[in-house]
Image: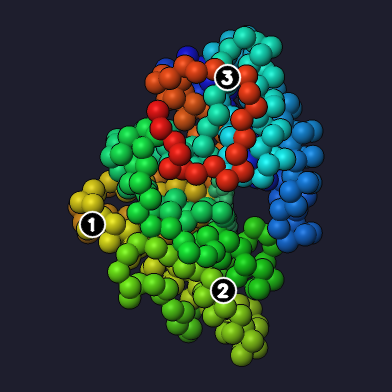
Amino acid sequence: MRILGIETSCDETAAAIYDENAGVLSHRVHSQVALHDQYGGVVPELAARDHLTKILPVIESVLKDSKLTLQQLNGIAYTKGPGLVGALLIGAMTGQTLSYALNIPAIPIHHLEGHLLAAMLEEKKPAFPFLALLVSGGHTLLIKANKLGHYEILGETLDDAVGEAFDKTAKLLGLPYPGGAHLASLALKGKKRFLFPRPMVDRPGLDFSFSGLKTFAVNTIKTHILDEQTKADVAFAFEEAVIDTLVIKCKRAIEKTHIKHLVIAGGVGANLNLRQRLTKLMEKVQGTLFTPRTEYCTDNAAMIAYAGFLRFKMERTPTLSVDVSPRFDLLELTI
Ligand code: KG4
Ligand code: ZN
């Protein structure tokens, strides 16, 4: 079975081909970062228009890279949501049109299920049940993944997502959008000088709150001369506070569930410091950390093609309706 994956939920136009025997044959991501940079964030209408012009060339390139024709595909998986409605519609319409024209099934995929399963694309893959720390620009979740389509949310953010907090703090430091990776590199030059709070760690439970860190950064910046070293010191203190908080909550989730397999997922999962700290934690509790390569942490279509493949194996319910859901709830999923 060979599945074409299509991902257009936000500002990346992505396609990939997953083969049941050979794994990911090819995957491409066209990033719209340059398009949205001047606005300091994603402009939904511009995103949708850009997906429209890029989606077919991106699909053509993954076919070319894997030396396949459309006729050699057996199914199509596209992101149904959550995401920007105009952006989602481009991927869904493309997927459904190809499905109709080629007479092969198309399946709608939950974007977060894609992220959760991305670690399974690696040689060292997790088996259900596992815990997942899903940290992206729009989501911060601690999840207990029981089996395909059966997920429990153990904790989530009450305000900003981790990636959002990284991006907002990076913007305060004058870094380009999206600022997560830029802030992380700047933090490498930082010294231990400021102490940011570790939000909600003194309360029981597994929820998060990151908006206070951004306010703390604003106040620190206001009360200091913002030279290059101070910027790096703020980046360092911010990153340490975020990572400490995430690590503490992961440890709590392991203690609560007694599950010692932890998967890292989503764009912030690309953060090296976070990966190192979680590796240490898992060594300490004698568990295992599963990390997708960084290009499978950030938005991509390989994870969508793979989620589609697993679902095609379980259910074959092709539908001709163009199914998008900007606020798609992970708990609505079943199989
Ligand atoms: O999963 P993703 O590509 O898109 C969403 O579904 O949101 O995540 C993007 C987020 C952005 O906020 C970006 O700044 C953050 O991931 N990010 C990072 C790093 N690389 C990407 N944050 C911290 N450190 C990084 N190295
Ligand atoms: Zn994502």
- In the image, residue 9 above or below residue 313: below
User: What residue is shown with label 1?
Assistant: 256
Which quadrant of the picture is home to ligand 1?
bottom right
Residue at 73%, 26% (x, y): give it: 56
Q: Give the structural element (helix, strand or loop) at label 3.
A: loop
**Residue 319, labelled with which disc?**
3
Quick one: label 2, few (<14), some, or many (20+) residues within 10 Å?
many
- In the image, residue 229 above or below residue 92: below
- Which of labels 2 and 1 is toward the front? 1
**Residue 214, labelled with which disc?**
2
What kind of residue is marked 2?
Lys
User: Percent position (x, y) of residue 256?
Assistant: 23, 57
| Ligand 1 within 8 Å of the CB at mark 2 | no
Quick one: label 3, few (<14), some, or many (20+) residues within 10 Å?
some
Q: Give the structural element (helix, strand or loop) at label 2.
A: helix
- Which of labels 3 and 2 is toward the front? 3
User: Percent position (x, y) of residue 249?
Assistant: 34, 62
- Which of labels 3 and 1 is toward the front? 3
User: Percent position (x, y) of residue 64?
Assistant: 66, 20
What kind of residue is marked 1?
Lys
Residue at 73%, 61% (x, y): give it: 40
Frontmost residue, 270 versus 149: 149
The tag earlier along the polypeptide, 2 or 1, is 2
Give the mark count: 3
Q: Is residue 175 visible?
A: yes
The tag earlier along the polypeptide, 3 or 2, is 2
